């Protein structure tokens, strides 16, 4: 990796419109490039004529030898000093805002890096117009939102189409466990209670649990465990817009990126695998409890062996807006395939106080005048 004083972003001849010379951009919901000026279109990929064969890379092979045989691509990125996000930028820009935290960024020079080429991507299916409409609707529907927040809904410059990097992991696991299976039963008890000022005896049923030792082994097969490889968009927030249709992955082609930004990988393969193991562990625990059976389960010991682990690098599309309000960053994202939304929002203390006071006045009015 090397720093360049003024990196040059070259436009491929394949991205130039033959009719008017403008830069062709990928059109969401299609598999072709489109010219926004003269309407010319160039096909990128035809899913009806081409069969996509998904290939995984052995994790064990990678950890031993690295990705020496994997193809690399050279990209120019800008790193935000505010949030640490690293993203591509459009040619000929001298200043911009970070799409993740809305910090102003003067582009004095980017970083030219040679990175491993993603294997596959999911193209955008939701257009900018559709995403912006959802964004505006979401902002305007917020309860107790500051009154001056509405101008963010009309700021198209802060609304970005962004490809986010993910790792996906496949793995087989074999887990030996020991614990106990709990079986509930009811017992009767006589208790004294006060009723109408008198002490009376009543029968109550109490649930108790009979525990029995349990041990065994469960096996799990994990396919496409998704781990976001971005530090600028949190995994919990991405989880809220999940349900990525990975059956529609297409081979990576930078033409799909034309007109959009791309974040580079900031979570390495090893850390991503540890995150994937955390997700696998939750499923393993669920499988063990099912195997133990009974009304309740107690797990005393787990020993899991992982085998056949493999991975791939993919890009998924989101529409992203980040805005600063009173010194705090608020982020809003939309799944670029399904339109699912997730976001942060500010609250107006003034509106909350007025709402409380209004409620108290209403209660007072009712108590004074309604008999």
Image (cartoon, rainbow, N blue to C red):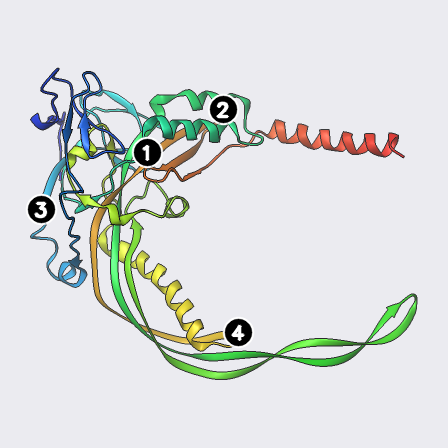
- As drawn, the label of residue 296 is 4
Q: Earlier in the sequence, mark 2 or mark 3?
A: 3
Residue 98 as seen in the image, left or right of residue 249: right
Question: Mark 4 to mark 3: distance in Å?
Answer: 51 Å
- The residue most toward the bottom is 213
Q: Above or below — where is 300 with respect to 96?
A: below
Q: Nearer the viewer, mark 4 or mark 3?
A: 4
Please, what secondary structure does the residue beneath circle 3 have? loop
Q: Earlier in the sequence, mark 1 or mark 4?
A: 1
Q: Nearer the viewer, mark 1 or mark 4?
A: 1
Q: Say whether marks 1 and 4 touch (CB < 8 Å).
A: no
Please, what secondary structure does the residue beneath circle 4 have? strand
**Residue underneath mark 2:** 149
**Residue underneath mark 1:** 126
Question: Mark 1 to mark 4: distance in Å?
Answer: 45 Å
Q: Is residue 7 visible?
A: yes
Residue 258 as seen in the image, left or right of residue 341: left
Q: Earlier in the sequence, mark 4 or mark 2?
A: 2
**Closest to the observer, 32 or 158:** 32
**Residue underneath mark 3:** 71
Name the residue located 54 percent from the left edge and 74 percent from the top edge: 295
């Amino acid at each position: 990796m090397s720093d360049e004083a003024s990196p040059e972003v070259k436009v491929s001849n394949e991205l130039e419109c033959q009719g008017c010379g403008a830069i062709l951009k990928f059109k969401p919901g299609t598999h072709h490039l489109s010219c926004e000026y003269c309407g010319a279109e160039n096909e990128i990929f035809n899913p009806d004529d081409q069969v996509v064969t998904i290939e995984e890379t052995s994790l064990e092979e990678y950890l031993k030898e690295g990705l020496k045989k994997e193809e690399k691509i050279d990209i120019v990125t800008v790193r935000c000093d505010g949030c640490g996000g690293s993203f591509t930028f459009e040619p000929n820009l001298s200043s911009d805002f970070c799409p993740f935290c809305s910090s102003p960024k003067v582009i004095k020079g980017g970083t030219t890096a040679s990175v491993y080429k993603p294997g596959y991507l999911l193209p955008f299916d939701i257009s900018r117009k559709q995403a912006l409409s959802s964004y505006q609707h979401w902002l305007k529907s917020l309860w107790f939102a500051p009154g001056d927040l509405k101008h963010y809904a009309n700021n198209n410059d802060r609304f970005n189409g962004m490809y986010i990097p993910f790792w996906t992991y496949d793995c087989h696991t074999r887990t030996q466990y020991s614990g106990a299976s709990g079986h509930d039963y009811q017992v009767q008890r006589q208790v004294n209670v006060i009723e109408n000022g008198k002490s009376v005896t009543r029968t109550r049923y109490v649930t108790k649990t009979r525990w029995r030792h349990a041990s065994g082994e469960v096996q799990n097969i994990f396919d496409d465990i998704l781990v976001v490889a971005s530090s600028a968009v949190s995994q919990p927030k991405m989880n809220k817009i999940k349900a990525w249709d990975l059956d529609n992955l297409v081979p990576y082609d930078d033409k799909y990126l034309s007109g959009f930004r791309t974040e580079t990988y900031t979570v390495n393969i090893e850390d991503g695998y540890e995150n994937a193991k955390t997700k696998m562990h939750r499923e393993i625990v669920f499988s063990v409890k099912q195997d133990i059976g009974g009304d309740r389960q107690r797990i005393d010991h787990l020993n899991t062996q992982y085998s056949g682990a493999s991975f791939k690098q993919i890009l998924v599309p989101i529409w992203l807006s980040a805005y600063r309000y009173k010194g705090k960053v608020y982020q809003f994202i939309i799944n670029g395939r399904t339109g699912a939304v997730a976001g942060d929002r500010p609250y107006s203390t003034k509106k909350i106080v007025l709402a409380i006071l209004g409620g108290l006045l209403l209660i007072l009015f009712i108590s004074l005048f309604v008999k």
